[in-house]
Amino acid sequence: MKSTARSTASLTHNSLALLGAVVLSLFASHAVAAEVGVAARIRQCTTCHGADGNSQTPKIPSLAGQPEFFILNQLILMREGVREVAIMTPFVKDLTDADAEALAKHFSALEAKRSDETIDPGLAARGGARVAALHCASCHLPSFVGHDQMPRLAKQRIDYMVESLKAIRDSQRAGGDSLMTAAVAGVSDADLEALAHYVSSQ
Ligand code: HEC
Ligand code: HEC
């Protein structure tokens, strides 16, 4: 009886030591996994958003040169399901705050470049006049590079912005900024296209 108790005690002791070792090694491998995690995530993101953060894919936005806080904010909104982007859900649903911050830092530091879409000079000229009348620069800045939660529009894909502007105007972007919705209230599809050509050319 005594000896069984002793061996149980020592077994427990050994198990605890073993458990301790497993926990330690889990922590160690987790630390490595977290680092590899960000690099692996960046690779996932670039399959859609472009190798250098500049998208060559229709209707997928470029992330390069976006304000760091804008990217972070959108990632958190998507992770929480406030801004619903079904195609991105698998990539953001288990994103930690630290990973989201690292991704935002990475993409905001890349240089924004225009896609191969053609700027229509007539539309851009009309868009320039509408931009002035609608005070878009008051939030997105006169150079349209954005700041804080206001996205960069300069060099962004035209097809993505046309679709976004329609969705925002029609209150179809869940979690969208209501001031932005107000800014394009009642603006025609043709004018939204003109606005996109102008700001992308900046
Ligand atoms: C399967 C393709 C795909 C992958 C992979 C993907 N995204 Fe996206 N992402 C999209 C699409 C499409 C949109 C535009 C959604 C919309 O129309 O509102 C988007 C939008 C965004 C936006 C909002 C940009 C804006 O200008 O409004 C951010 C930020 C973003 N993605 C970051 C990421 C990051 C970071 C990753 C990697 C963790 C990632 N995405 C992975 C397809 C993808
Ligand atoms: C009161 C500030 C404000 C004004 C004025 C404003 N915007 Fe915005 N805009 C925002 C914010 C904030 C967002 C981010 C949207 C969100 O979080 O829902 C945004 C988003 C956008 C987007 C989507 C970009 C993306 O990457 O997802 C486009 C395109 C855009 N604005 C164009 C314009 C144009 C064109 C005008 C002028 C007609 C304009 N904005 C006026 C604040 C503003």
Image (cartoon, rainbow, N blue to C red):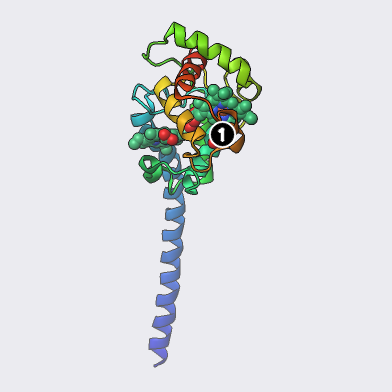
Residue 74 x, y percent position in the rendering: 52, 38
Relative to 14, 136 lies left or right: right
Determine whether, in the image, residue 43 is placed left or right of residue 169.
left
Q: Residue at x 44, y 49 (%)?
A: 94
Is 8 situated above or below 86? below
In the image, 113 versus 7, the foreground residue is: 113
Residue under the point 52% across and 25% down: 187
137, 91: nearer the viewer: 137
Q: Quadrant of ligand 2?
A: top right
Residue at screen point 47% across, 46% down = 79
Corner quadrant of residue 84: top left
Return the x and y of residue 98 as percentages of the image width and height.
Answer: 53, 42
Q: Percent position (x, y) of residue 184?
A: 55, 28
Is any atom of residue 99 visible in this view?
Answer: no
Q: Residue furthest bottom?
A: 1
User: In the picture shown, does residue 122 fall above or below 131?
Assistant: above
Residue under pointer 1: 181
Residue 16 lies, with reference to residue 5, above or below; the image says above
